[in-house]
Image (cartoon, rainbow, N blue to C red):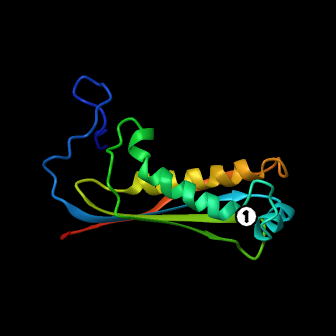
Amino acid sequence: MRKLTHVNARGEASMVDVSAKPILRREAFARGEIRLNQATLKLIQSHTIAKGNVLASARLAGILAAKKTGELIPLCHPLPITHCEVSFDIPKTQDRVIITASAKIAAQTGVEMETLTAVTVAALTIYDMCKAVDKRMRITDIKLISKTKKEGR
């Protein structure tokens, strides 16, 4: 079994020292979904939710969250991400919004926490904007899809 990286020799929480690691181009993808009533989805698609354009707001909230991840998660490194994208897909079942986030960076550590945070905050934004009309929404299946690193800047 691998040792936990965020625990020091005394068993205390500790930020990982990445100063000796090389700067690599890194990219990560995460996905999650929010399940909701079909009537709620129709309101989202027709831009008739009282709080405004739900998906545009969720996209901006997700991108901002990715940029602020190091401020939200105590042992996460603050990273100057070079690109973040949040997108939405509505399947034919019309019962959910699938949220996908990607982020890129040239750094000494990965950017997966930023994509996971982007998906989570985008889903929470949809929830917040639609809670007045749909009390049964469920945020689910948030997961890292992939992360890669390559040499070069």
Q: Is residue 59 above or below residue 1?
A: below
Q: Which residue is drawn at 33% across and 46% down?
A: 78
Q: Which of 2 and 35 is in front in this view?
A: 35
Location of residue 19 in the rendering, given as x and y in whole percent from the top left corner: 16, 46
Q: Residues within 10 Å of mark 1 (few under 14, many from 20)?
A: many
Query: Which quadrant of the rendered structure holds the N terminus?
Result: top left
Would you say 88 lies left or right of 75 here? Answer: right
Q: Residue at x 78, y 72 (%)?
A: 93
Would you say 13 lies left or right of 96 here? Answer: left
Place residue 106 in its image quadrant.
bottom left
Q: Which residue is drawn at 73% across and 64% down?
A: 96
Residue to which mark 1 is pinned: 96
Q: Is residue 78 above or below residue 149?
A: above
Would you say 125 lies left or right of 108 here? Answer: right
Whether residue 149 is visible to the viewer of this picture, yes or no, is yes
Q: Which of 34 and 121 is in front in this view?
A: 121
Location of residue 65 in the rendering, given as x and y in whole percent from the top left corner: 49, 50
Secondary structure found at label 1? strand
Place residue 99 in its image quadrant.
bottom right
Q: In this view, does 82 lie above or below 64?
A: below
Query: Which quadrant of the rendered structure holds the C terminus?
Result: bottom left
Whether residue 32 is visible to the viewer of this picture, yes or no, is no
Q: Residue flagged by tag 1: what amino acid is it? A: Arg
